[in-house]
Image (spheres, rainbow, N blue to C red):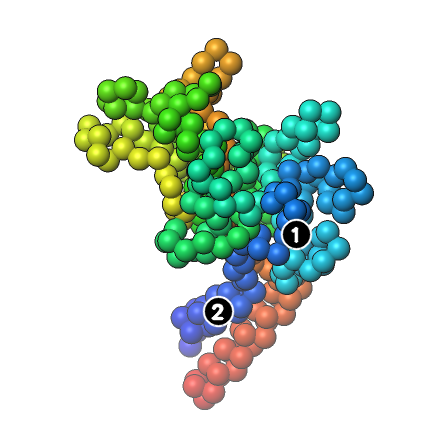
Amino acid sequence: MKIKFSIPLTLVVFLFATAALNAQTSVVSFESLPVPGSGFFNGDTAGGSPYRNNFTITGTGAFGETLQTWEMDSLDFFNSFESTFGSWNGFSWSNISDNTTPGFTNQYAAYPGGGSDGAGGMNLNENYTVAFSDASYFNLPENTSLQSVDLTNTTYAALSMANGDSFGKTFGGESGNEEDFFKINLVGYDQVDRGGNQTGSVEFFLADFRFSDNSLDYILNQWATVDLTSLGSVRSVGVTFASSDVGAFGINTPTYFAMDNLTFTTTAVPEPSGLLFLWTGLITIYFRRSKKILA
């Protein structure tokens, strides 16, 4: 008698269920990052501060305290601070709630007036991050798949677009019919520090005045949850900006945005020996059951 070798559906389901038990979904809310009295940290390590440039969130407690309880590799946000002029780029973090003061001096404020609590942009938490310039990127643990992130404008960028300033124009122009826009692209890479191959990109508009009906034009003033699943499995994510307001030296719109509640899933990959043991054991059980049926 010939016996057809096949793996029962119940066995396949069991294997996938076992793998799923090793997946962990995490939400980076930034709430436990220590905020200086100024209300923001931009990488300035002067004065014996315990802070360092690239800020890292790990289960072991960067900055000398427990930030999260993840059992995974670190999550790194690029930051570069230049002490001579006090300039920075990359990511900073903040809890500033000022959504009325225009200009560069208010560059660390999220336009909604606080961080996102994930409730459709209607309720606010304290901490969030602010990204500045195309230098912004972050690294993720191995075997990570991004799920979503909450994004919005900074007060500096939003009021520049709404009213114009010494660099940027008023979006829509005097007539309101000019088709202005301000957007970012989140680009996934399969290696850290924006290395290797791109895995995909997600386009997100922070302001859009391209509608034929001007009543639909908007400058984002609430937190919006953006789906990142199309980026696939990534090790780093970089940022690029684009705007309709471009001059001789590049984009005139302040190249800032605020970010909160970065959500991703990390899957622990079993050791090959462990997988072999699992397969051997399950197949042995299957054949024992088959022999009993044939007997």
The number of callouts visible is 2
Q: Residue 17 has which mark?
A: 2
What amino acid type should be assigned to the residue bearing mark 1? Answer: Pro
Residue 151 image point, x, y percent: 44, 43
Q: In percent of the image, x 73 and y 25: which residue is there?
A: 84
Residue 146, how many percent across, how many down?
A: 49, 49
**Position of residue 241 in the picture relative to residue 220 (left or right):** right
Q: Position of residue 175 (x, y in %)?
A: 24, 20
> Viewed as shown, does residue 100 lie left or right of 73?
left
Q: Going by the image, does 289 lie left or right of 204?
A: right
Q: Is residue 18 above or below residue 241?
A: below
Q: Residue furthest top?
A: 248
Q: Quadrant of the C terminus?
A: bottom left
SS for tag 1?
A: loop
Q: Nearer the viewer, residue 231 or 255?
A: 255
Q: Which mark is residue 104?
A: none
295 in relation to 20, above or below: below
Q: How many C-alpha atoms fall within 10 Å of the one at disc 1: few (<14), some, or many (≥20)?
A: some
Chain-order first, disc 1 or disc 2: 2
Query: Which residue is nearer to you in this view: 247 or 168?
Result: 168
Q: Position of residue 137 (x, y in %)?
A: 58, 37
Identify the residue position indicated by label 1 in the image: 34
In the rendered structure, which amino acid carries the disc numbered 2? Ala
